[in-house]
Amino acid sequence: MFEISLDRVTWLHRVPAGVKLAVLALAGAAVFLVADHRVLGGFVAVALLLPLSARLPVRAVARQSLPAAILIALLAGFHVLTSEPDTAIEVSARLATVILLAVTLTLTTRVSAMVEAIETAARPLRLVGVDPAKVGLTLSLAIRFIPVLFALVSEIREAQKARGLEGSVVAVVMPLLVRTLKMADDLADAIAARGYDAE
Amino acid sequence: MTVKDMVYAALFAALTAALGLLPMIAVPGLPVPIHAQSLGVMLAGGVLGAKRGGLAMVVFLALVAAGLPLLSGGRGGIGIFLGPTGGFALGYIPGAFVTGWFVEKFWSRLNIVAALVACVIGGIGMVYLLGIPWLAAVAKISFMKAATGSLAFVPGDLVKAVLASLVAVSMKKSYPMIGRR
Amino acid sequence: MIEFDQVTMRFGELTVLDRISLSIAERRVAVVGANGSGKSTFARLLNGLIAPTDGHVRIDGLDTVKDARAVRRKVGFVFQNPDNQIVYPLVEEDVAFGLKNLKLPKDEIRTRVDAVLARYGMEHLRTRPAHLLSGGQKQMLAISSVLVMEPAYVVFDEPTTLLDLRNKRRVTRAIAEMPQTAVVVSHDLEFLEDFERVLVFEGGGIVCDAPPAVALPFYRDLMASVPDV
Ligand SMILES: Nc1ncnc2c1ncn2[C@@H]1O[C@H](COP(=O)(O)OP(=O)(O)OP(=O)(O)O)[C@@H](O)[C@H]1O
Ligand SMILES: [Mg+2]
């Protein structure tokens, strides 16, 4: 399966996904509670040092953080222009910390490990009637559907191009839906036929 | 949750991912190019209904959070939800749910106008309802500033609402999903 | 033993099967018939994927509706399109899926998955994403995922229709060699020549129920005699 995480082993790869998620959640909350510029600077420094310590390629980190970086720059510029440089520093430091930590987590955690962590995190939802095993199965089904749909989209676009319908979203979506809904119905049967009990 | 709920939700999550593959459409007169991905929100609600549509978006966002590069331009990861635009992403869930809720309400007499109302309230209204205050809070700007900044995307979203309504109405005729077990 | 007792299947106004009664004790049974003649409906009745409108279907005495869970365990089902029956993204996960549903211990799941992958020469594909397999490999995966559950009966609904000639041979050989009872819906008449019994479906009923030497020529004549509409 294609994914963002880097196919190598760094010390950050070895940290369990759940631990990384917990650190991200704590840091994300903490950074919004402080306003002292020195402390915020410390957060940014740590967030920058983490990917460096694991020697993650700068390009990969930059690629995933770029859209957020542009937005942060725009916001900082806005606050400077409205003569609130303090706010500019606060906002950009907080967002930069959170985004960098999140990108680091994403680059060093395999999707399968994250899906497991999500399944574990979904356990308390049992109390409100959500079965964590079903959460896992549904996520797996979606992962399984994605390459099939990607291939179908390309195929249907080719066919529509041949008929001169390129650029029409509806001309791609309608056949895509009809074909894949049939597939979904079949798959539901196949799941039942292999002894899966929804109850 | 039945097997059908799971399979359809997974399918529309994957569909939303696949829509991210379609090229951006630059519409003359619109300030920003339209991207097909958020069409998935209105399609999920408009075709599947409230519960399954909302679930589809939960699944889609969970996969993005898990680190699949499913957002347009190959982006993904949990950072998407923590940045200034995280509210718009989370808004996909109530967006699809509310679209679906209205489509179910209008089901017996669903036409293009009714479907459009559903898509605009759910797929646009709910998404902005979460997105704008989130942007304002995280970026420390005023609500009005956040709202006007988001305005550039409304025309494109309206075009998508029309497309989604067309699909929802023809799907009702050819492959009705609502009320199906 | 498979038993159909006065089974009628209707979809709305349309009667697809009309009061079918038969019992099957043979190990290789084929089902043939024109498109829309009710073959898939018949097949789906066998493991309770659908319930008859009237009458009963029993597998070793178990009712497919009342004892649905036990019947699912006994009767495996392989569909036409492998893409529509592979549940998990990775080969080994997909093979293990049915075993997890049987709530088997982890060790046993592992042993059984190993055994079935080895049996069909797919060990090297173990951690491969299923969507990267060839059509024939996918169908072999689908078959392995069913056989790993060790059902006593396996129903195949046109398992080779989408395959090229080489993969068709691979799949038909796998079916021919398996120890279980197989009920196979197929348009590949050559493959059915070694079967013990052939059921010909037409007009809501079974119009011929005989060994292939009799039933296949009957079916060929029937198809030749019906004018195109
Ligand atoms: N769930 C359903 N709802 C309504 N009609 C159905 C359903 N399933 C099957 N039918 C109808 O029942 C008839 C028999 O279908 P069936 O799939 O059993 O045929 P078949 O012999 O398998 O055909 P083919 O060779 O095309 O696979 C068809 O007319 C079909 O449209
Ligand atoms: Mg059939």
Image (cartoon, coloured by chain):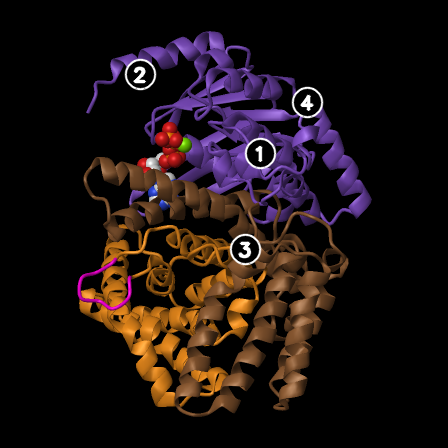
In this figure, which residue is indicated by the disc labeled 1? Answer: C142
Upstream in the sequence, badge 4 or badge 2? 4
In this figure, which residue is indicated by the disc labeled 4? Answer: C179
Q: Quadrant of the C terminus of chain C?
A: top left
In this figure, which residue is indicated by the disc labeled 3? Answer: B68
Q: From which residue to which does the magenta span run?
A: B26-33
Question: Is the residue marked by circle 1 packed among few (<14), some (14-19), or many (20+) residues within 10 Å?
Answer: many
The color chain C is rendered in: purple
Per the image, label 2 sits on a secondary structure element best described as: helix
In the drawing, what numbered circle is on residue C223?
2
Question: Tag 1: residue type?
Answer: Ala
For the residues labelled 3 and 2, the Cα–Cα distance comes to: 51 Å
The color chain B is rendered in: orange
Q: Chain of mark 2?
A: C
Residue A28 included in the magenta stretch of the image: no
Question: Tag 4: residue type?
Answer: Pro
- The picture quadrant for ligand 2 comes to top left
Q: State the image coordinates of residue C154 (x, y, percent, origin top left).
A: 59, 30
